[in-house]
Image: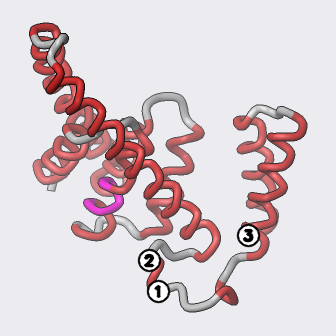
Amino acid sequence: MIFKLFLIFFKIGSFSIGGGYAIMPLIQEQVVNQQHWITEKTFTDIITISQMTPGPLVVNSSTFVGMQISGPIGAIVATFGSIIGGIIISIVLYNFFAKYKSSQYVFQVLNSLKASSLGLIMSAGFTMLLLAFFNNSDFRAISSIENIDVIAVLIAVISLFIIRKFKISPIIMMIITGFVGLLVYA
């Protein structure tokens, strides 16, 4: 189990192009849909906690998932697996781009990666909205608007309004809405 945990997060960390939000669909696909290590609800909780704690999203997520699966050893192995691939790729790519930095082909590849990263980030955002509002990330399984969590929608809309209108820090808003969620859903 520990070696499989390392391999899964090595793969996730090796393809974390575009940052933490872009990698969320890959983490979900691996740990929720393929391995069935955690449920969608637990995954959503882990992402929320990962966003609230300092550090990169993929590192925080891998630590929490590893902890859920195999305790402290799992947390260490999953975290190491998620960062070692990125370190190796960064070293290789740095040397490659330093050598070919004026190439038009390299420029076009980077532009393509930006577009795919945007798509992954949008997919992750949409998945988070579905999980928050419908408690289900499968768009096809949502049959009607009656399944919507009205309280979650109200909290999101009011939070967005307060952040935009009064320029309150998103961190403070996350803490406030965390307490509201505790009162409402506990």
Residue 150 in magenta stretch: no
What stretch of residues is rendered in magenta? 26-30
Instruction: Using the numbered discs, state the Cα–Cα distance from disc 2 to disc 1 in whole angstroms.
Output: 5 Å
User: Residue farthest to the front?
Assistant: 104
Say which mark, if any, is on residue 138. 2
Secondary element under disc 1, as helix, strand or loop, is helix
- In the rendered image, the quadrant that contains the C terminus is bottom right
Image location (x, y in percent) of residue 41: 50, 68
Q: Which residue is mark 3?
A: 185
Secondary element under disc 2, as helix, strand or loop, is loop
* 80 to 68, vertically: above or below: above
Is 61 positioned to the left or the right of 125 in the image? left
Residue name at image x 55 percent, y 46 percent? 49
Residue 27 in magenta stretch: yes
Q: Are marks 2 and 1 in contact (CB under 8 Å)?
A: yes
- Under mark 3, the amino acid is Tyr
Image location (x, y in percent) of residue 126: 52, 61
State the residue in front, 71 or 14. Answer: 14
Query: Toward which corner of the image does residue 22 lie, by quadrant?
Result: top left
- Under mark 2, the amino acid is Asp
State the residue in front, 72 or 147. Answer: 147
Say which mark, if any, is on residue 53. none
Residue name at image x 41 percent, y 39 percent? 20
Is 179 positioned to the left or the right of 64 in the image? right
Secondary element under disc 3, as helix, strand or loop, is helix
Q: Which residue is mark 1?
A: 141
In front: mark 1 or mark 3? 1
Dot 3 crowding, Cα within 10 Å, few <14, some 14–19, many 20+: few
| Colour setting | secondary structure
